[in-house]
Amino acid sequence: MALARRRFPAHARRMNQPAASVADTTRAGILFMCATAIVFAVQDGFSTFLVQNHSPIFVVMIRYWAFAAFVLAMAARRPGGIRAAARSKRPLLQTARGLLLALEICVMVTGFQVLGLVEAHAIFAIYPLLVAALSGPVLGEWVGWRRWTAIGAGFVGVLIILRPGLGVFDPAALIALTAALFFALYGLLTRLASRADNANVSFFYTGVAGAAGLTLVGPFFASSMTGAEIALMLVLCVTGVLGHYLMIKAYSLAEAATLQPFAYLQLVAASAIGVVVFAETMDAPTVAGAALIVGAGIFAAFRARRKAAR
């Protein structure tokens, strides 16, 4: 799920590589991105199981503990250790973005609980377009009319899914839209933080700040788990760590703009899990709206890549 989480200098490292070598590393990055999307979709499936009987905040807190342990282990292995990873020039900004991501995940998992995987992911797919729309006022990175057209098309896709005014609008759908907005803001804050800190520092605060914030509130929502649920929780933690590891590998091998279209595989995989495992349905407006959102997102990513190349 997150193409704006880190700033990776993959392009700079590959400038002097032969064309064949660059193509090979890009293909490898795409494969890692596809694996990341599938693992995160499976993780969403496990989360959906667990929140049927437990609070999303409690489930996400435990998941974040495993993520924070992974972040700390990675930081300890790098030069300077944990102290260097925690040394930020903008600690308040880093902490805020870490807490915002934790909040976004709680909101999104709540969306799985009340909407299901299919509809929640179909609406959430709007987040790259929200990033483009908000880049101007937040970062001063204004987009051209072509990407504004794509943004407008994406919002039409959301309206097709929500169907306001047709008697079938579910206010709960706004949960997924809120999660998309939070994730877009998180991505923008990450890019803002990258102007002061390197990717290792940002990654450290992503895990540690989020885990700390959830630990302050999560115990109030705690509930006892059965043996089977504990096993599912352990698998959820493992898939969370694995997903972030695969994402790091993907971004170290290929550019974000190249990988963005393949991140939409998570929508496809999560929808398949929703239909097969949870007996959810995919009506025609949801499929059409999601296709329009994904198409607009891919076009916006293509335009951003061309602008960067120029």
Image (tube, rainbow, N blue to C red):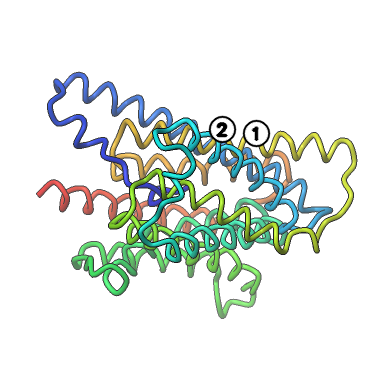
Name which quarter of the figure residue 138 lies in: bottom left
Name which quarter of the figure residue 102 lies in: bottom right
**Above or below for 64 versus 105:** above
In the picture provided, is 182 more to the left or to the right than 102? left
Compute the Cα span from label 2 to label 1. 6 Å
* Secondary element at tag 1: helix
Image point (43%, 61%), residue name: 91
Image point (36%, 37%), residue name: 251
In the picture provided, is 103 more to the left or to the right than 144? right
Tag 2 and tag 1, C-beta contact below 8 Å: yes
Q: Which residue is mark 2?
A: 242
Q: Nearer the viewer, residue 156 or 232?
A: 232
Image point (68%, 52%), residue name: 60
What residue type is disc 2 on? Leu
Image point (58%, 77%), residue name: 166
**Above or below for 100 versus 294:** below
Label tally = 2
* Secondary element at tag 2: helix
Percent position of residue 214, x then y: 66, 58
Q: Residues within 10 Å of mark 1 (few under 14, many from 20)?
A: some
Percent position of residue 148, x then y: 26, 67
Q: Which residue is mark 1?
A: 238
Of all residues, the one furthest to the left in this rendering is: 310
Percent position of residue 59, x then y: 73, 51
What residue type is disc 1 on? Val
In the picture provided, is 211 more to the left or to the right than 136? right
Percent position of residue 225, x then y: 87, 45
